[in-house]
Image: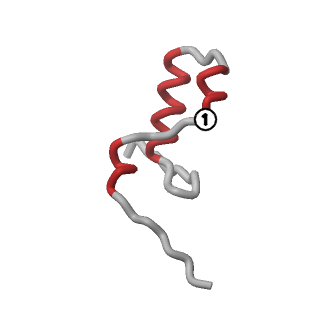
Amino acid sequence: MEQNQVRSEDRAYFTMMPNIIDDMGLDPYAFRLYVHLRRVAGENGACWQSTD
């Protein structure tokens, strides 16, 4: 069975986040860090963010 995938540039303009993250009561710094890591993570959720 062949799988068809829709490829779009739309994902470059937003990041989706589970609602539970908003309900966890994270401080603004932890929340912002989570959102950043979520943004730079690939489709499979793997992130190798570096300061280099």
User: Around disc 1, counting alpha carbons within 10 Å, would you say few (fewer than 14), some (14 to 19), or many (20 or more)?
Assistant: few
Residue 23 pos. (x, y %):
65, 20
Front-lying residue, 10 or 24: 10
- Pick the front one: 17 or 2: 2
Q: Residue at x 59, y 23 (%)?
A: 22
Q: Is residue 23 left or right of residue 33?
A: right
Q: Quadrant of the N terminus?
A: bottom right
Identify the amino acid type marked 1: Pro
In the picture of the structure, the residue carrying the numbered disc 1 is 18
Label 1, secondary structure: give it.
loop
Q: Position of residue 11 (x, y in %)?
A: 39, 50
- Please, which residue is most extreme toward the bottom here? 1
Residue at (57, 51) in percent of width and height: 45
Where is residue 42? Give x, y as percent.
49, 54
- Residue found at x 52% / y 56%: 43
40 in relation to 1, above or below: above
Q: How many marks?
A: 1
Visual colour scheme: secondary structure
Q: Nearer the viewer, residue 23 or 26?
A: 23
Task: Please name the residue shown 57% across and 57% down the image.
Answer: 44
Q: Is residue 9 left or right of residue 36?
A: left
